[in-house]
Amino acid sequence: MSEAVLTVEGLGVRIAGRQVLDGVDFAIAPGEFTGLIGSNGAGKTTLFRAILGLQRPTSGRVLLGGRPRSRRGAGIGYVPQKFLLDPDLPLRGRDLVALGFDAGRLGPSTRLRRRRAAVEEALAAVDAEAFADTRVGRLSGGEQQRILIAHALISRPRLLLADEPLANLDLRSAQEVVSLLARVCREQGVAVLISAHEINPLLPVMDRIVYLAHGRAASGTSEEVIRADVLSRLYGHHVDVIDVHGRVLIVAGAGDDADLAGCEETVEHTEVIQ
Amino acid sequence: MMFEGFMVNAWEVASIVAVVAGVVGFFTVLRGAAFAAHSIPNGSFAGAAGASLVGLGTLFGLGVFAFAGALGIGLLGRRGRHDAVTALMLVMMLALGALFVSFSSEYAPEVYSLLFGEVLGISANAVLPTLLLGILCLLVVAILYRPLMLSSALPEVGEARGISAFAMELAFLGVLALATTMTVPVVGTLLIFSLMIGAPAAARSFTDRPAVAMALSVAFALAIVWFAIAASYETNWPVGFFVGTASAAAFVLGRVWAYARARMGRRPSARPSPS
Ligand SMILES: Nc1ncnc2c1ncn2[C@@H]1O[C@H](COP(=O)(O)OP(=O)(O)OP(=O)(O)O)[C@@H](O)[C@H]1O
Ligand SMILES: [Mg+2]
Protein backbone atom coordinates (compact mmCIF):
# COMPACT_ATOMS: atom_id res chain seq x y z
CA MET A 1 0.00 0.00 0.00
CA SER A 2 1.27 3.45 -0.78
CA GLU A 3 2.08 5.92 1.97
CA ALA A 4 -1.03 7.37 3.62
CA VAL A 5 -1.68 11.07 2.90
CA LEU A 6 -2.99 11.51 6.40
CA THR A 7 -2.41 9.46 9.52
CA VAL A 8 -4.09 10.38 12.77
CA GLU A 9 -2.64 8.50 15.72
CA GLY A 10 -4.24 8.44 19.14
CA LEU A 11 -5.31 12.04 18.75
CA GLY A 12 -6.71 13.65 21.86
CA VAL A 13 -7.80 17.27 22.17
CA ARG A 14 -8.86 18.90 25.39
CA ILE A 15 -10.50 22.30 25.23
CA ALA A 16 -11.54 24.26 28.30
CA GLY A 17 -11.34 21.17 30.47
CA ARG A 18 -13.44 19.09 28.12
CA GLN A 19 -12.11 16.07 26.26
CA VAL A 20 -13.39 16.94 22.78
CA LEU A 21 -11.43 14.22 20.99
CA ASP A 22 -10.11 11.10 22.63
CA GLY A 23 -7.78 8.55 21.04
CA VAL A 24 -8.85 9.12 17.45
CA ASP A 25 -7.07 6.78 15.04
CA PHE A 26 -7.40 6.55 11.28
CA ALA A 27 -5.46 6.86 8.05
CA ILE A 28 -6.38 8.05 4.58
CA ALA A 29 -4.75 6.68 1.44
CA PRO A 30 -4.02 8.90 -1.58
CA GLY A 31 -7.09 9.62 -3.67
CA GLU A 32 -9.50 8.16 -1.16
CA PHE A 33 -12.91 9.66 -0.43
CA THR A 34 -13.57 9.66 3.30
CA GLY A 35 -16.65 10.81 5.16
CA LEU A 36 -16.29 12.15 8.69
CA ILE A 37 -19.66 11.54 10.27
CA GLY A 38 -20.82 12.87 13.60
CA SER A 39 -23.67 14.83 15.12
CA ASN A 40 -23.43 18.46 16.26
CA GLY A 41 -20.65 18.91 18.76
CA ALA A 42 -19.08 15.52 18.03
CA GLY A 43 -15.73 17.18 17.33
CA LYS A 44 -15.59 17.25 13.51
CA THR A 45 -14.40 20.84 13.22
CA THR A 46 -11.96 20.32 16.07
CA LEU A 47 -10.50 17.31 14.26
CA PHE A 48 -10.07 19.37 11.09
CA ARG A 49 -8.38 22.13 13.02
CA ALA A 50 -6.03 19.63 14.60
CA ILE A 51 -5.17 18.19 11.18
CA LEU A 52 -4.47 21.69 9.88
CA GLY A 53 -2.28 22.54 12.86
CA LEU A 54 -4.67 25.21 14.11
CA GLN A 55 -5.52 23.26 17.24
CA ARG A 56 -2.75 21.77 19.35
CA PRO A 57 -3.42 18.16 20.28
CA THR A 58 -3.06 17.23 23.94
CA SER A 59 -2.05 13.72 22.96
CA GLY A 60 -1.28 11.72 19.86
CA ARG A 61 -0.11 13.12 16.55
CA VAL A 62 -0.99 13.92 12.97
CA LEU A 63 1.23 12.73 10.12
CA LEU A 64 1.03 14.05 6.59
CA GLY A 65 2.50 11.75 3.97
CA GLY A 66 3.97 9.72 6.83
CA ARG A 67 5.86 12.64 8.32
CA PRO A 68 5.05 15.28 10.91
CA ARG A 69 3.79 18.46 9.32
CA SER A 70 6.57 20.69 8.05
CA ARG A 71 4.72 23.88 7.30
CA ARG A 72 1.23 24.68 8.49
CA GLY A 73 -1.35 23.77 5.90
CA ALA A 74 1.21 22.57 3.38
CA GLY A 75 -0.49 20.30 0.86
CA ILE A 76 -3.93 20.59 2.45
CA GLY A 77 -6.90 22.43 1.01
CA TYR A 78 -9.53 23.59 3.48
CA VAL A 79 -13.11 24.67 3.06
CA PRO A 80 -14.30 25.84 6.48
CA GLN A 81 -17.78 25.23 7.85
CA LYS A 82 -18.50 28.87 8.53
CA PHE A 83 -17.29 31.79 6.51
CA LEU A 84 -18.66 35.22 5.91
CA LEU A 85 -18.02 37.14 2.72
CA ASP A 86 -18.96 40.81 2.69
CA PRO A 87 -21.30 41.49 -0.28
CA ASP A 88 -19.47 44.78 -0.92
CA LEU A 89 -16.06 43.12 -1.12
CA PRO A 90 -14.52 44.10 -4.47
CA LEU A 91 -13.48 40.52 -5.16
CA ARG A 92 -14.89 38.29 -7.87
CA GLY A 93 -15.09 34.54 -7.55
CA ARG A 94 -12.12 34.17 -9.86
CA ASP A 95 -10.06 36.61 -7.77
CA LEU A 96 -10.63 34.51 -4.70
CA VAL A 97 -9.65 31.38 -6.60
CA ALA A 98 -6.50 33.16 -7.85
CA LEU A 99 -5.58 33.92 -4.25
CA GLY A 100 -5.48 30.18 -3.69
CA PHE A 101 -2.70 29.92 -6.25
CA ASP A 102 -0.15 32.08 -4.49
CA ALA A 103 -1.64 33.86 -1.46
CA GLY A 104 1.02 32.37 0.75
CA ARG A 105 3.73 34.24 -1.13
CA LEU A 106 4.98 37.72 -0.48
CA GLY A 107 5.50 40.43 -3.05
CA PRO A 108 3.87 40.87 -6.44
CA SER A 109 2.66 37.92 -8.52
CA THR A 110 5.24 36.68 -10.94
CA ARG A 111 3.51 33.79 -12.68
CA LEU A 112 0.47 35.61 -13.97
CA ARG A 113 -0.04 33.55 -17.11
CA ARG A 114 0.23 30.25 -15.32
CA ARG A 115 -2.04 31.54 -12.63
CA ARG A 116 -4.71 32.55 -15.11
CA ALA A 117 -4.66 29.10 -16.70
CA ALA A 118 -4.80 27.43 -13.30
CA VAL A 119 -7.77 29.60 -12.29
CA GLU A 120 -9.70 28.58 -15.42
CA GLU A 121 -8.93 24.95 -14.76
CA ALA A 122 -10.00 25.13 -11.12
CA LEU A 123 -13.21 26.97 -12.00
CA ALA A 124 -14.00 24.33 -14.62
CA ALA A 125 -13.36 21.53 -12.15
CA VAL A 126 -16.19 22.82 -9.93
CA ASP A 127 -18.47 24.08 -12.74
CA ALA A 128 -18.18 27.66 -11.48
CA GLU A 129 -17.44 29.49 -14.75
CA ALA A 130 -20.97 30.87 -14.99
CA PHE A 131 -20.69 32.94 -11.81
CA ALA A 132 -16.94 33.46 -11.58
CA ASP A 133 -17.19 37.13 -12.53
CA THR A 134 -19.72 38.08 -9.87
CA ARG A 135 -18.67 39.54 -6.54
CA VAL A 136 -18.11 36.53 -4.36
CA GLY A 137 -20.02 38.01 -1.41
CA ARG A 138 -23.16 38.23 -3.56
CA LEU A 139 -23.14 34.59 -4.65
CA SER A 140 -25.47 32.06 -3.07
CA GLY A 141 -24.14 29.80 -0.33
CA GLY A 142 -23.77 26.86 -2.69
CA GLU A 143 -21.95 28.96 -5.27
CA GLN A 144 -19.59 30.35 -2.65
CA GLN A 145 -18.95 26.79 -1.56
CA ARG A 146 -17.82 25.90 -5.07
CA ILE A 147 -15.57 28.93 -5.30
CA LEU A 148 -13.94 27.92 -2.02
CA ILE A 149 -13.45 24.37 -3.28
CA ALA A 150 -11.80 25.77 -6.42
CA HIS A 151 -9.68 28.03 -4.21
CA ALA A 152 -8.55 24.97 -2.28
CA LEU A 153 -7.94 22.84 -5.38
CA ILE A 154 -5.81 25.35 -7.25
CA SER A 155 -2.89 24.83 -4.89
CA ARG A 156 -2.92 21.16 -5.92
CA PRO A 157 -3.29 19.72 -2.42
CA ARG A 158 -2.95 16.02 -1.74
CA LEU A 159 -5.76 16.27 0.77
CA LEU A 160 -8.92 18.35 0.68
CA LEU A 161 -10.80 18.99 3.91
CA ALA A 162 -14.39 20.16 3.55
CA ASP A 163 -16.22 20.91 6.79
CA GLU A 164 -19.94 20.27 6.40
CA PRO A 165 -20.20 21.54 2.84
CA LEU A 166 -23.67 20.01 2.60
CA ALA A 167 -25.19 21.94 5.48
CA ASN A 168 -27.54 24.67 4.24
CA LEU A 169 -27.84 23.05 0.83
CA ASP A 170 -31.05 21.61 -0.53
CA LEU A 171 -31.06 17.96 -1.47
CA ARG A 172 -30.26 18.49 -5.12
CA SER A 173 -27.40 20.92 -4.47
CA ALA A 174 -26.05 18.60 -1.80
CA GLN A 175 -25.98 15.72 -4.27
CA GLU A 176 -24.26 17.97 -6.79
CA VAL A 177 -21.56 18.93 -4.33
CA VAL A 178 -21.04 15.29 -3.35
CA SER A 179 -20.67 14.13 -6.93
CA LEU A 180 -18.47 17.13 -7.66
CA LEU A 181 -16.14 16.26 -4.78
CA ALA A 182 -16.19 12.60 -5.78
CA ARG A 183 -15.23 13.61 -9.33
CA VAL A 184 -12.42 15.83 -8.11
CA CYS A 185 -11.24 12.99 -5.93
CA ARG A 186 -11.11 10.51 -8.84
CA GLU A 187 -9.93 12.83 -11.60
CA GLN A 188 -7.31 14.78 -9.71
CA GLY A 189 -6.28 12.06 -7.31
CA VAL A 190 -6.93 14.31 -4.31
CA ALA A 191 -7.86 12.56 -1.11
CA VAL A 192 -11.08 14.10 0.19
CA LEU A 193 -12.16 14.22 3.82
CA ILE A 194 -15.64 15.64 4.14
CA SER A 195 -17.60 16.05 7.34
CA ALA A 196 -21.36 15.67 7.60
CA HIS A 197 -23.92 14.77 10.20
CA GLU A 198 -25.94 12.77 7.74
CA ILE A 199 -24.48 9.61 6.31
CA ASN A 200 -26.84 8.77 3.45
CA PRO A 201 -25.86 11.37 0.83
CA LEU A 202 -22.26 10.15 1.12
CA LEU A 203 -22.86 6.40 1.14
CA PRO A 204 -22.57 5.88 -2.64
CA VAL A 205 -19.18 7.61 -2.92
CA MET A 206 -17.36 6.91 0.34
CA ASP A 207 -14.31 4.64 0.29
CA ARG A 208 -13.94 5.04 4.01
CA ILE A 209 -15.89 6.38 6.92
CA VAL A 210 -14.67 7.91 10.15
CA TYR A 211 -17.54 7.93 12.59
CA LEU A 212 -17.22 10.32 15.53
CA ALA A 213 -19.29 10.13 18.68
CA HIS A 214 -18.49 11.45 22.13
CA GLY A 215 -15.02 12.40 20.91
CA ARG A 216 -14.11 8.86 19.92
CA ALA A 217 -13.88 7.50 16.42
CA ALA A 218 -14.48 4.28 14.54
CA SER A 219 -13.11 4.00 11.04
CA GLY A 220 -13.11 1.59 8.15
CA THR A 221 -15.27 0.93 5.12
CA SER A 222 -18.95 1.68 5.61
CA GLU A 223 -19.68 -2.06 5.88
CA GLU A 224 -17.15 -2.29 8.68
CA VAL A 225 -18.36 0.74 10.61
CA ILE A 226 -22.09 1.06 10.06
CA ARG A 227 -22.90 -1.97 12.21
CA ALA A 228 -24.89 -2.18 15.37
CA ASP A 229 -22.04 -3.65 17.43
CA VAL A 230 -19.41 -1.11 16.32
CA LEU A 231 -21.64 1.91 16.76
CA SER A 232 -23.04 0.65 20.05
CA ARG A 233 -19.50 0.41 21.40
CA LEU A 234 -18.78 3.92 20.14
CA TYR A 235 -21.91 5.47 21.62
CA GLY A 236 -21.54 3.47 24.80
CA HIS A 237 -25.07 2.15 24.61
CA HIS A 238 -27.17 0.06 22.30
CA VAL A 239 -27.75 1.39 18.82
CA ASP A 240 -29.58 -0.23 15.93
CA VAL A 241 -28.69 0.11 12.30
CA ILE A 242 -31.68 -0.21 10.05
CA ASP A 243 -31.55 -0.47 6.29
CA VAL A 244 -34.57 1.10 4.63
CA HIS A 245 -34.48 0.66 0.86
CA GLY A 246 -30.76 1.31 0.71
CA ARG A 247 -30.86 4.17 3.21
CA VAL A 248 -29.31 3.70 6.59
CA LEU A 249 -31.05 4.76 9.76
CA ILE A 250 -29.11 4.78 12.99
CA VAL A 251 -31.46 4.70 15.92
CA ALA A 252 -31.17 4.30 19.66
CA GLY A 253 -32.21 0.81 20.49
CA ALA A 254 -34.66 -0.15 23.21
CA GLY A 255 -33.14 1.19 26.39
CA ASP A 256 -33.67 3.76 29.04
CA ASP A 257 -34.34 7.43 28.39
CA ALA A 258 -30.74 8.48 28.94
CA ASP A 259 -29.66 6.22 26.12
CA LEU A 260 -32.31 7.61 23.86
CA ALA A 261 -31.21 11.15 24.59
CA GLY A 262 -27.67 10.33 23.55
CA CYS A 263 -28.78 9.22 20.14
CA GLU A 264 -31.60 11.58 19.60
CA GLU A 265 -29.83 13.81 17.17
CA THR A 266 -28.66 10.98 14.99
CA VAL A 267 -32.17 9.66 14.79
CA GLU A 268 -33.55 13.06 14.07
CA HIS A 269 -31.12 13.76 11.28
CA THR A 270 -31.48 10.45 9.57
CA GLU A 271 -35.23 10.74 9.64
CA VAL A 272 -35.36 14.26 8.31
CA ILE A 273 -33.60 13.47 5.06
CA GLN A 274 -35.17 12.10 1.88
CA MET B 1 -0.10 81.92 -7.68
CA MET B 2 -1.52 78.56 -6.88
CA PHE B 3 1.40 76.64 -8.36
CA GLU B 4 4.27 78.74 -7.11
CA GLY B 5 6.54 79.03 -4.10
CA PHE B 6 5.33 77.36 -0.91
CA MET B 7 2.32 76.00 -2.78
CA VAL B 8 4.57 73.59 -4.64
CA ASN B 9 5.32 71.83 -1.37
CA ALA B 10 1.64 71.62 -0.61
CA TRP B 11 0.88 69.95 -3.93
CA GLU B 12 3.75 67.49 -3.60
CA VAL B 13 3.15 66.46 -0.01
CA ALA B 14 -0.61 66.29 -0.39
CA SER B 15 -0.22 64.05 -3.43
CA ILE B 16 2.01 61.63 -1.53
CA VAL B 17 -0.48 61.60 1.34
CA ALA B 18 -3.34 60.92 -1.05
CA VAL B 19 -1.59 57.93 -2.63
CA VAL B 20 -0.86 56.41 0.77
CA ALA B 21 -4.38 57.12 2.04
CA GLY B 22 -5.85 55.52 -1.08
CA VAL B 23 -3.82 52.33 -0.69
CA VAL B 24 -4.02 51.94 3.08
CA GLY B 25 -7.66 53.01 3.04
CA PHE B 26 -8.43 50.27 0.54
CA PHE B 27 -7.46 47.64 3.11
CA THR B 28 -9.06 49.63 5.92
CA VAL B 29 -12.45 49.46 4.23
CA LEU B 30 -11.85 45.85 3.13
CA ARG B 31 -11.17 44.79 6.70
CA GLY B 32 -13.95 46.88 8.20
CA ALA B 33 -11.33 48.70 10.25
CA ALA B 34 -12.74 52.20 9.88
CA PHE B 35 -12.98 52.64 13.61
CA ALA B 36 -9.30 51.83 14.06
CA ALA B 37 -8.51 54.26 11.24
CA HIS B 38 -10.42 56.87 13.17
CA SER B 39 -8.94 56.08 16.57
CA ILE B 40 -5.24 55.76 15.76
CA PRO B 41 -4.87 59.22 14.15
CA ASN B 42 -7.05 60.90 16.77
CA GLY B 43 -5.34 59.19 19.66
CA SER B 44 -1.89 59.92 18.28
CA PHE B 45 -2.70 63.62 18.62
CA ALA B 46 -2.13 63.11 22.36
CA GLY B 47 1.39 61.85 21.64
CA ALA B 48 2.21 65.03 19.76
CA ALA B 49 0.85 67.14 22.59
CA GLY B 50 2.93 65.19 25.11
CA ALA B 51 6.07 65.41 23.00
CA SER B 52 5.78 69.16 22.58
CA LEU B 53 5.30 69.45 26.35
CA VAL B 54 8.64 67.80 27.12
CA GLY B 55 10.37 69.45 24.17
CA LEU B 56 10.57 66.46 21.83
CA GLY B 57 9.53 66.62 18.18
CA THR B 58 5.80 66.36 17.65
CA LEU B 59 6.35 63.86 14.83
CA PHE B 60 8.16 61.60 17.28
CA GLY B 61 5.33 61.78 19.82
CA LEU B 62 2.81 61.22 17.08
CA GLY B 63 4.60 58.12 15.85
CA VAL B 64 5.05 56.62 19.31
CA PHE B 65 1.38 57.03 20.15
CA ALA B 66 0.22 55.79 16.76
CA PHE B 67 2.22 52.58 17.10
CA ALA B 68 1.30 52.15 20.77
CA GLY B 69 -2.36 52.53 19.87
CA ALA B 70 -2.05 50.06 16.98
CA LEU B 71 -0.27 47.54 19.18
CA GLY B 72 -2.85 47.97 21.93
CA ILE B 73 -5.75 47.40 19.56
CA GLY B 74 -4.01 44.41 18.01
CA LEU B 75 -3.04 42.70 21.25
CA LEU B 76 -6.17 43.40 23.26
CA GLY B 77 -8.40 42.71 20.27
CA ARG B 78 -7.01 39.24 19.88
CA ARG B 79 -9.85 37.99 22.01
CA GLY B 80 -13.23 39.55 22.21
CA ARG B 81 -14.71 42.41 20.32
CA HIS B 82 -12.50 44.71 18.37
CA ASP B 83 -14.70 47.78 18.55
CA ALA B 84 -14.80 47.87 22.34
CA VAL B 85 -11.02 47.52 22.55
CA THR B 86 -10.50 50.19 19.90
CA ALA B 87 -12.78 52.56 21.75
CA LEU B 88 -10.90 51.88 24.95
CA MET B 89 -7.55 52.72 23.33
CA LEU B 90 -8.99 55.90 21.85
CA VAL B 91 -10.47 57.00 25.15
CA MET B 92 -7.20 56.35 26.98
CA MET B 93 -5.16 58.31 24.47
CA LEU B 94 -7.63 61.17 24.38
CA ALA B 95 -7.56 61.35 28.18
CA LEU B 96 -3.79 61.67 28.08
CA GLY B 97 -4.11 64.27 25.35
CA ALA B 98 -6.47 66.35 27.47
CA LEU B 99 -3.99 66.18 30.33
CA PHE B 100 -1.01 67.16 28.17
CA VAL B 101 -2.83 70.06 26.60
CA SER B 102 -3.92 71.36 30.00
CA PHE B 103 -0.28 71.24 31.18
CA SER B 104 1.05 73.28 28.33
CA SER B 105 0.85 76.89 29.47
CA GLU B 106 0.98 78.60 26.14
CA TYR B 107 -0.96 78.05 22.98
CA ALA B 108 0.87 75.43 20.91
CA PRO B 109 -0.08 76.06 17.30
CA GLU B 110 1.83 73.08 15.91
CA VAL B 111 -0.19 70.76 18.13
CA TYR B 112 -3.52 72.27 17.20
CA SER B 113 -2.61 72.23 13.55
CA LEU B 114 -2.41 68.45 13.85
CA LEU B 115 -6.14 68.33 14.23
CA PHE B 116 -6.91 70.09 10.99
CA GLY B 117 -3.61 69.91 9.15
CA GLU B 118 -1.70 72.74 7.57
CA VAL B 119 -1.55 71.76 3.96
CA LEU B 120 -1.09 75.28 2.69
CA GLY B 121 1.71 76.00 5.12
CA ILE B 122 3.92 72.99 4.44
CA SER B 123 7.62 73.75 4.41
CA ALA B 124 10.09 72.35 1.92
CA ASN B 125 11.81 70.13 4.45
CA ALA B 126 8.58 68.21 5.09
CA VAL B 127 8.62 66.78 1.58
CA LEU B 128 11.45 64.29 1.94
CA PRO B 129 10.37 62.63 5.23
CA THR B 130 6.82 62.35 3.93
CA LEU B 131 8.06 60.75 0.74
CA LEU B 132 10.26 58.25 2.57
CA LEU B 133 7.56 57.23 5.03
CA GLY B 134 5.10 57.00 2.14
CA ILE B 135 7.39 54.70 0.18
CA LEU B 136 7.91 52.52 3.23
CA CYS B 137 4.14 52.27 3.67
CA LEU B 138 3.55 51.28 0.07
CA LEU B 139 6.40 48.80 0.16
CA VAL B 140 4.93 46.98 3.14
CA VAL B 141 1.51 46.83 1.47
CA ALA B 142 3.06 45.58 -1.79
CA ILE B 143 4.87 42.80 0.05
CA LEU B 144 1.85 41.73 2.09
CA TYR B 145 -0.78 42.34 -0.61
CA ARG B 146 -1.87 38.75 -1.28
CA PRO B 147 -1.70 37.22 2.20
CA LEU B 148 -3.35 40.33 3.61
CA MET B 149 -6.09 40.11 0.98
CA LEU B 150 -6.83 36.46 1.71
CA SER B 151 -6.66 36.96 5.46
CA SER B 152 -9.04 39.94 5.20
CA ALA B 153 -11.59 38.03 3.10
CA LEU B 154 -11.34 34.56 4.65
CA PRO B 155 -9.22 34.60 7.82
CA GLU B 156 -9.80 30.92 8.59
CA VAL B 157 -8.75 29.75 5.14
CA GLY B 158 -5.68 31.96 5.43
CA GLU B 159 -4.84 30.45 8.81
CA ALA B 160 -5.10 26.99 7.32
CA ARG B 161 -2.54 28.02 4.71
CA GLY B 162 -0.15 29.30 7.31
CA ILE B 163 -1.11 32.96 7.12
CA SER B 164 -1.61 34.02 10.72
CA ALA B 165 -4.65 36.28 11.02
CA PHE B 166 -3.11 37.82 14.13
CA ALA B 167 0.16 38.61 12.35
CA MET B 168 -1.81 40.13 9.46
CA GLU B 169 -3.85 42.23 11.87
CA LEU B 170 -0.72 43.52 13.58
CA ALA B 171 0.94 44.22 10.23
CA PHE B 172 -2.11 46.07 8.99
CA LEU B 173 -2.40 48.15 12.15
CA GLY B 174 1.32 48.88 11.90
CA VAL B 175 0.84 50.19 8.36
CA LEU B 176 -2.07 52.25 9.61
CA ALA B 177 0.14 53.72 12.33
CA LEU B 178 2.87 54.45 9.81
CA ALA B 179 0.39 56.13 7.48
CA THR B 180 -0.94 58.12 10.43
CA THR B 181 2.51 59.35 11.40
CA MET B 182 3.26 60.61 7.93
CA THR B 183 -0.13 61.99 6.96
CA VAL B 184 -1.45 63.62 10.13
CA PRO B 185 1.04 66.52 10.16
CA VAL B 186 -0.10 67.34 6.65
CA VAL B 187 -3.85 66.88 6.51
CA GLY B 188 -4.60 66.52 10.21
CA THR B 189 -6.20 63.71 12.19
CA LEU B 190 -9.72 64.56 11.15
CA LEU B 191 -9.05 64.67 7.46
CA ILE B 192 -6.89 61.63 7.02
CA PHE B 193 -9.84 59.67 8.29
CA SER B 194 -12.23 61.03 5.68
CA LEU B 195 -9.65 60.51 2.96
CA MET B 196 -8.94 56.92 4.03
CA ILE B 197 -12.60 55.96 4.10
CA GLY B 198 -14.29 58.11 1.47
CA ALA B 199 -12.02 57.34 -1.47
CA PRO B 200 -11.80 53.52 -1.13
CA ALA B 201 -15.45 53.14 -0.15
CA ALA B 202 -16.41 55.06 -3.26
CA ALA B 203 -13.95 53.09 -5.41
CA ARG B 204 -15.52 49.74 -4.73
CA SER B 205 -18.86 50.88 -6.05
CA PHE B 206 -17.28 51.29 -9.46
CA THR B 207 -15.57 47.96 -9.93
CA ASP B 208 -15.63 44.33 -8.84
CA ARG B 209 -11.90 43.85 -9.27
CA PRO B 210 -9.58 44.30 -6.30
CA ALA B 211 -6.62 45.78 -8.18
CA VAL B 212 -8.83 48.19 -10.10
CA ALA B 213 -10.61 49.17 -6.88
CA MET B 214 -7.27 49.98 -5.27
CA ALA B 215 -6.14 52.05 -8.26
CA LEU B 216 -9.46 53.92 -8.29
CA SER B 217 -9.15 54.51 -4.57
CA VAL B 218 -5.80 56.21 -5.13
CA ALA B 219 -7.20 58.20 -8.06
CA PHE B 220 -10.15 59.42 -6.01
CA ALA B 221 -7.94 60.36 -3.07
CA LEU B 222 -5.69 62.37 -5.40
CA ALA B 223 -8.65 64.08 -7.03
CA ILE B 224 -10.18 64.94 -3.66
CA VAL B 225 -6.95 66.39 -2.30
CA TRP B 226 -6.15 68.38 -5.43
CA PHE B 227 -9.64 69.75 -5.59
CA ALA B 228 -9.56 70.64 -1.89
CA ILE B 229 -6.26 72.53 -2.16
CA ALA B 230 -7.34 74.48 -5.20
CA ALA B 231 -10.73 75.30 -3.73
CA SER B 232 -9.21 76.29 -0.43
CA TYR B 233 -6.67 78.51 -2.14
CA GLU B 234 -9.37 80.25 -4.12
CA THR B 235 -11.92 80.66 -1.36
CA ASN B 236 -9.74 80.84 1.74
CA TRP B 237 -12.06 78.30 3.32
CA PRO B 238 -10.33 75.51 5.26
CA VAL B 239 -8.89 72.60 3.27
CA GLY B 240 -10.59 70.24 5.68
CA PHE B 241 -14.01 71.40 4.66
CA PHE B 242 -13.32 70.52 1.05
CA VAL B 243 -11.60 67.20 1.78
CA GLY B 244 -14.49 66.09 3.96
CA THR B 245 -17.28 67.13 1.65
CA ALA B 246 -15.52 65.83 -1.46
CA SER B 247 -14.94 62.45 0.22
CA ALA B 248 -18.58 62.20 1.14
CA ALA B 249 -19.59 63.31 -2.34
CA ALA B 250 -17.38 60.64 -3.93
CA PHE B 251 -19.02 58.01 -1.76
CA VAL B 252 -22.52 59.16 -2.70
CA LEU B 253 -21.54 59.24 -6.34
CA GLY B 254 -20.30 55.65 -6.06
CA ARG B 255 -23.57 54.52 -4.55
CA VAL B 256 -25.58 56.25 -7.25
CA TRP B 257 -23.39 54.66 -9.88
CA ALA B 258 -23.79 51.19 -8.38
CA TYR B 259 -27.53 51.69 -8.18
CA ALA B 260 -27.74 52.89 -11.76
CA ARG B 261 -25.60 50.02 -12.97
CA ALA B 262 -27.80 47.52 -11.20
CA ARG B 263 -30.90 49.15 -12.66
CA MET B 264 -29.51 49.12 -16.16
CA GLY B 265 -28.70 45.44 -15.68
CA ARG B 266 -25.29 45.79 -17.27
CA ARG B 267 -23.66 43.93 -14.45
CA PRO B 268 -24.66 40.36 -13.67
CA SER B 269 -25.70 41.63 -10.26
CA ALA B 270 -28.60 39.26 -10.00
CA ARG B 271 -27.48 35.79 -9.11
CA PRO B 272 -27.12 33.49 -12.04
CA SER B 273 -29.58 30.69 -11.54
CA PRO B 274 -27.83 27.67 -10.04
CA SER B 275 -27.30 25.12 -12.73
N1 LIG C 1 -12.65 27.02 21.48
C1 LIG C 1 -13.51 26.25 22.15
N2 LIG C 1 -13.86 26.55 23.41
C2 LIG C 1 -14.73 25.78 24.10
N3 LIG C 1 -15.30 24.69 23.60
C3 LIG C 1 -15.00 24.33 22.34
C4 LIG C 1 -14.10 25.10 21.55
N4 LIG C 1 -13.99 24.51 20.35
C5 LIG C 1 -14.80 23.44 20.40
N5 LIG C 1 -15.41 23.32 21.58
C6 LIG C 1 -16.34 22.26 21.99
O1 LIG C 1 -15.92 21.07 21.41
C7 LIG C 1 -17.04 20.30 20.98
C8 LIG C 1 -16.83 19.89 19.54
O2 LIG C 1 -16.91 21.04 18.73
P1 LIG C 1 -16.80 20.96 17.16
O3 LIG C 1 -16.98 22.34 16.65
O4 LIG C 1 -15.56 20.25 16.81
O5 LIG C 1 -18.05 20.07 16.80
P2 LIG C 1 -18.61 19.69 15.36
O6 LIG C 1 -18.64 18.21 15.28
O7 LIG C 1 -17.88 20.41 14.32
O8 LIG C 1 -20.11 20.21 15.49
P3 LIG C 1 -21.07 20.85 14.36
O9 LIG C 1 -21.69 19.71 13.61
O10 LIG C 1 -22.11 21.58 15.17
O11 LIG C 1 -20.24 21.76 13.52
C9 LIG C 1 -18.26 21.16 21.19
O12 LIG C 1 -18.95 20.69 22.31
C10 LIG C 1 -17.72 22.54 21.46
O13 LIG C 1 -18.50 23.20 22.38
MG1 LIG D 1 -18.32 21.81 12.98
Image (spheres, coloured by chain):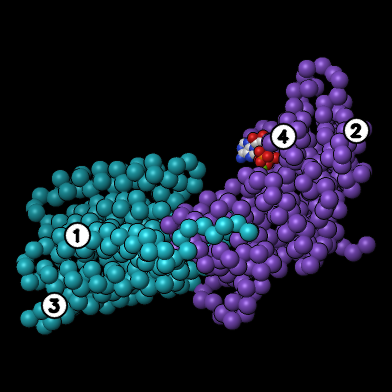
Q: CA distance from mark 2 to mark 1?
A: 71 Å
Q: Specify which label sits upstream in the sequence, 4 or 2.
A: 2
- Name the front one of labels 1 and 3: 1
Quadrant hosting residue B247: bottom left
Residue A228 numbered mark, or none: 2
Residue B192 quadrant: bottom left
Real-space CA distance between mark 2 and mark 3, rounded to the nearest whole angstrom: 85 Å
Chain containing the residue with disc 2: A
Please state the chain letter of the residue tagged with numbered disc 1 in the rendered image: B
Question: Of circles 3 and 4, which is in front?
Answer: 4
- Residue A11 image label: none
Q: Is residue B165 visible?
A: no
Residue at the top extreme, as displayed = A256
List the residue tagged with mark 4: A272
- Answer few, some or many: residues within 10 Å of disc 1's Cα (few below 14, many 20 plus, some between 14 and 19): some
According to the picture, the residue beneath numbered tag 1 turns out to be B245
Residue nearer the viewer, B268 or A119: B268
- Element at badge 1? helix
Identity of the amino acid at label 3? Met
Q: Amino acid at mark 1?
A: Thr
Residues flagged by tags 2 and 3 on a common chain? no
Which residue is depicted at the point 76% across and 35% down?
A270
Q: For the residues marked 1 and 3, what is the alpha-carbon distance in whole angstroms?
A: 22 Å
Q: Quadrant of residue A232?
A: top right
Residues flagged by tags 1 and 4 on a common chain: no
Few, some or many C-alpha atoms within 10 Å of disc 3 (few <14, some 14-19, many ≥20)? many
Residue at x 49% of width, y 72% of height: B143
C-alpha gap between disc 3 and disc 4: 73 Å
Chain letter, colour cyan in render = B
Do marks 3 and 4 share a subunit? no
